[in-house]
Amino acid sequence: MSLFYVVAFLSIIFALLVIFTKNPVHSVLYLIATFFTFTIHYIILNAQFLAVVNFIVYMGAIMVLFLFVLMLMNLNTDTEPMKSTLLKVVGAIAGGCLLVTLIGSMKTLSTASTTAMDNTGIGLVENLGKVLFSDFLLPFELSSILLLAAMVGAVLLAKKENKTA
Amino acid sequence: MELEFLIEKTALVLVLFVLTLTIAAYSTWAERKVAAWLQDRVGPNRAGPFGLLQPLADGGKMFFKEEIIPSGANKYLFIAGPSLALLVSFLGTAVIPFGQNIEIFGRVVPLQVTDINVGILYIFGVVSLGVYGIMIGGWASNNKYSLMGAIRGASQNISYEIAMGLSIIALLMVTNTLSFKEIAAQQHGWHWNVLYQPLGFLIFLICAFAETNRVPFDLPECETELIGGYQTEYSAFKMGAYMFAEYINMFVSSVVMAVLYFGGYNYPGMDAVNQALGPTWGPLIGVGVMFFKIIAFIFFFMWVRWTVPRFRYDQLMDLGWKVLIPLAIANIVITAIVIVGFDLFNKL
């Protein structure tokens, strides 16, 4: 349990650093560290497959792309466009609304009723695969169609730009 | 029991660590010797017999050179880059079984640091982390050539990771497990996976060259276009760390290929040898066979480096996206059809 608190503390610290650092590249690096602590959380929960997939997909691929784009744009504090106060106020209100919604939804959750899972092997590849391809087959296939649609959309956008140029 | 387990694992980790370092150091020597041999020269022959002390001399030189951190560089990230590259490159060998269980002083010791049941994915994740060292170092140098090299490295790694992952999926369909230990055990004798997955192996091999940034895919450090790529601004041991990381990556890729496709410690007739030599020396022969395979792969890496010219960047991307990925997907489909076909045939 103490390990959980250490890792949770680190997650929060890194997540806060993502927001508070001035340099966008540092921000992304802290986000990578945050994801790494998430991987440790998954391992503590004995969800090995999820841990490794989080590691590969988020840390290994998505964040590399983030870093890639940021390095290409080469944002500096000097060139960063100043945001107007109106935008800041709107952002604060929107964020506040999100917070209220989150807290509201948390209140309906009864945390006391969470039971420890008997089957600790649920996070292993074999069990996860069986569950995904039997009980959750439809949502699984639907989400893959969603990803395909996103991919086609991205390709289409890139193509359009090519034609006009 | 607990203490013995700790000692056993610590010893294994230490041996592996020293071995990795030694092989990486002697890879630099072997690379020059191979290059010299292929180009009909002598190669390093001054330091020690056959130039065998050359890696020590090089290492000493790296340590004593002046460290230069460019004034425009981001200091912490500039140091973090090569450190990360070196650190990440060491992680891979933790899940590799280097031999069968071996009996030492009456105790059965598995020659594997840890057998996690997602071993292949772990290696895959570690490989995908390797690019951060290049990216962070290249960006922190605050030099346009470094940045170009870093960006090339990142896009190249991401592109070839996809084809690599797809080729591994086809392999998993054959092996039905993600654990290295089981995969190695399945290839008992001559049942090497390369016989079942020749196309998958070819794709994996090409991707391994791209992931380790070796010629013909060494675009991130292409000296004719980018001076030194991401390592342009680096000097002394920081540059050495990058170079070392590259050789360690080469070693790890060779190990992974040897275990996944070339049977690891298995060889035809191993049962007879194991029976004749007993539970200590028999598995040790297997370890020897494994290292023979690894060294053969390392030699292949070098052979290619001094034979094949470098790709152009658009050719590299075309090969990755338009040739290897479709081929890998076709490989998955064919593998699936064959497996299902065999199942049906067996049921008849």
Image (cartoon, coloured by chain):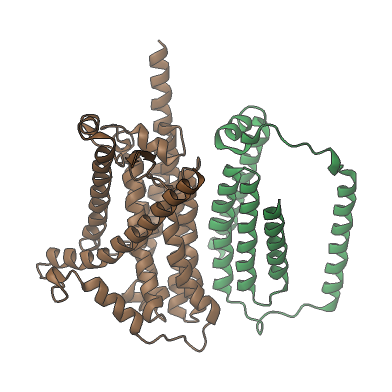
Chain colours: A green, B brown
Q: Can you say which quadrant of the picture contains the C terminus of chain A?
A: bottom right
Q: Residue furthest bottom?
A: B71
Residue B328 visible within the image: yes
Q: Find residue A140 and report its horizontal and vertical position in percent.
A: 64, 36
Residue B26 or residue A95, whichever sits in front:
B26
> Residue shown at 61%/63% (left/top)?
A33
Measuring from the top left, give residue B332's x and y in whole percent.
43, 36
Q: With respect to residue B162, does B37 lie above or below?
A: below
Q: Residue at x 82, y 73 (%)?
A: A87
- Establish if B288 lies above or below B241: above
In this view, B221 is above or below B122: below
Query: Quadrant of the rendered structure where residue B287 is?
Result: top left
Task: Look at 36% across and 48% down and name the residue there.
Answer: B256
| Residue B184 screen position, x and y as percent | 36, 38
Between B133 and A149, the residue placed more toward the observer is: B133
Residue B193 % position (x, y): 33, 36
In the picture, measured across the screen, residue B93 lies left or right of residue A55, that is left
Q: Name the residue nearer the viewer: A86 or B181.
A: B181
